[in-house]
Amino acid sequence: FGNPIYTYNLRQGIEDGFLAPYKVISVELDIDRDGYTPEPGKTDIDGNPVEQRTYTQEEFDRKIIVEDRRQLVAERITEFMKVNDLRYAKTIVFCENIEHAQDMVRRLENLNADLVAENPKYIMQITGDNDVGKAELDNFVDPSSRYPVVTVTSRLMSTGVDAETCKNIVLDRSVGSMTEFKQIIGRGTRVKEKFECAGEE
């Protein structure tokens, strides 16, 4: 379409007060840095032999599932929320695909069993194939609704979700571009407006 006649970037939106400032916390796991080489004779869930080579971070949860890595990610998320008193802070966890999201929900539920016992909607899977979860999307973005607190998705919530009270965005998947990264981060930069009504005298 040619060159844009006007641009307005993320930094300008933050400086002008339209978007909330954010902090990126990068967590580097040893397996992400060094890669993963399966032990000889390892098989997948179908009993097929796993190719003997070193898998890189970009291949995790796409070409190979490393159970220990998934568990460690779930533990890190839970620990961060506990240590920083954010257990009721609205959070979106982005996974590689629907299977990954389903598994992450299970792991997070096990690690946060106390809050799941209080309300089973504490953690919800919101993906394209999950009608129950999609029905809770409006409640997640509603500032007056406490539940769900943690939503786990793959692609469904990466754009078009105006979550004014979202505090944490967790990326457990590869992001293809800076544009996509900013779109995802944008789910957590919405500013919640405060409205006050003047009383009648």
Image (cartoon, rainbow, N blue to C red):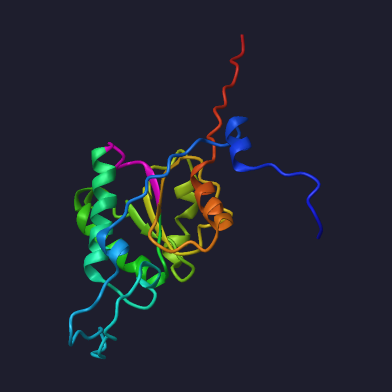
Magenta residues (range): 84-92
Q: Quadrant of residue 191?
A: top right
Compared with residue 33, is residue 14 higher up or lower down, i.e. above or below?
above
- Residue 192 is situated, as x and y percent measured from the top left of the image, at 53, 34
Can you say which quadrant of the picture contains the N terminus? bottom right
Q: Nearer the viewer, residue 200 or 181?
A: 181
Q: Residue furthest top?
A: 201
Can you say which quadrant of the picture contains the C terminus? top right
- Residue 93 is situated, as x and y percent measured from the top left of the image, at 39, 56
Left or right of 73, for residue 172: right
Task: Work out whether residue 9 can be spotted.
Answer: yes
- Residue 10 is situated, as x and y percent measured from the top left of the image, at 60, 42
**Magenta stretch secondary structure, dominant:** loop
- Residue 111 is situated, as x and y percent measured from the top left of the image, at 21, 55
Name the residue: 49% across, 64% down: 155
Task: Work out whether residue 108 can be spotted.
Answer: no
Name the residue: 31% across, 63% down: 32
